[in-house]
Amino acid sequence: MALSEFNLIERFFVRDNPQRKDVVLGIGDDCALLNVPEGQSLAVSMDTLVEGVHFLHETAAADVAAKAMAVNLSDLAAMGAEPAWITLSLSIPKIDLGWLQAFSDSLHELLVHYGLQVVGGDTTRGPLSITMQVHGFVPENVALRRSGAEAGDVVCVTGTLGDASLGLQVAEHQLAAHGEYRDSLLDKFYRPQAKVAAGIALRSRATAAIDISDGLVADLGHICKASQVGAVISAEKLPISEAAKKVTNPDRVLECALTGGEDYELCFTIKEDDVSKVRSALETVGVACYEIGRVTGKSDVRVFKDGEQITLTKSGFDHFAAA
Ligand code: ADP
Ligand code: MG
């Protein structure tokens, strides 16, 4: 796509791109030149979304852009990093101007919202796939890692769980939902909101953190593994949305809350003495803090309901196991 690629980049990714002061040189040369502020670590994360694997064929271009941003920003949020720059690799089957316009308009809206600049990328012809890399800053030594949880810490999440998974089931016609409940579940699935401000508010406060992309049990399991601890969760304490309660039975909702992916809420651990401090820090950025369990000395994630341990049929979504 040698000739038209340049025009395409110019038209959809250079124009209107916000300009940051720390970008010495953005799109257009062989590399971008970027300045990392003194005393900060560069936090970098990349995610690929492949049509038919990570998003449904019928997904609107605007939603694809929003999801690519959300999954990337969510990783930065989970580290307590502040996003700054994006690089974007697009593989597209053909030059569909309408699709590209909708994709870049949606992207642009989010760039402006978060104060981000696209500083480079690559464009190729191939099956529809979007690889985005996000770069952000976090002051040295305050990044939230998966590895700091200790027995006795409180396990918290930032929002309701299971909605995105139920939204996917609605989108795939496996679950019936109507009116505002349908809209809100679909919105959670198509337009997840990365908890960027919450991640920053948790700096130096959370002992460990992760974003929930594969399901609570699987992702909390990653914290436990990295921290060499275990956790117990109380099913009764899991935050469940009104919409989730209304569209299906409690068992299905619980299963989605425990194992459904793509909610992009943060799961984090804190010292018991810090609960009220953390709760008000999150409140100032408009994010809730739900206590759902405890870190233990054992090495697995166990779920209790009505005082009894329940066993899970699957613990989240595993790409390779599913193949
Ligand atoms: P090269 O051949 O050196 O890889 P390209 O022609 O692929 O250069 O890209 C030219 C410029 O446009 C580079 O600065 C590159 O980072 C940028 N670029 C290419 N594709 C995209 C894209 N999809 N989004 C943003 N920037 C892009
Ligand atoms: Mg290139």
Image: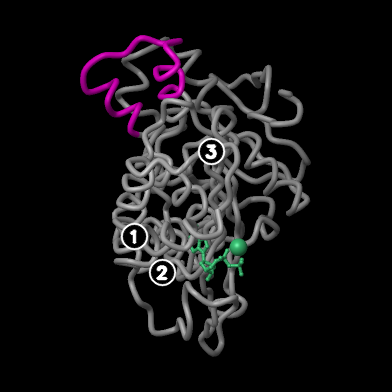
Q: Secondary structure at mark 1?
A: helix
What residue range appears in magenta? Answer: 166-187
Mark 1 surroundings: few (<14), some (14-19) or many (≥20) residues within 10 A: some
- Which residue sits furthest front? 3
Q: Position of residue 39 (x, y in %)?
A: 56, 87
Q: Amino acid at mark 3?
A: Pro
Q: In this figure, which residue is indicated by the disc labeled 1?
A: 280
Q: Amino acid at mark 1?
A: Ser
Work out whether mark 2 precedes mark 1 in sequence or the reverse, and give the earlier one: 2
- In the rendered structure, does residue 288 fall within the stretch colored magenta? no
Residue 244 shown left or right of residue 269 in the figure: left
Work out whether mark 1 precedes mark 3 in sequence or the reverse, and give the earlier one: 3
Work out whether mark 3 precedes mark 2 in sequence or the reverse, and give the earlier one: 3
Q: In this figure, which residue is indicated by the disc labeled 3?
A: 93
Residue 133 shown left or right of residue 289 in the figure: right
Residue at x 53%, y 82% (from the top left corner): 34
Q: Amino acid at mark 2?
A: Gln
Distance from disc 3 to disc 2, alpha carbons, whole Å, reads: 25 Å
Quadrant of the rendered image holding ligand 2: bottom right
Q: Position of residue 68 (x, y in %)?
A: 48, 47
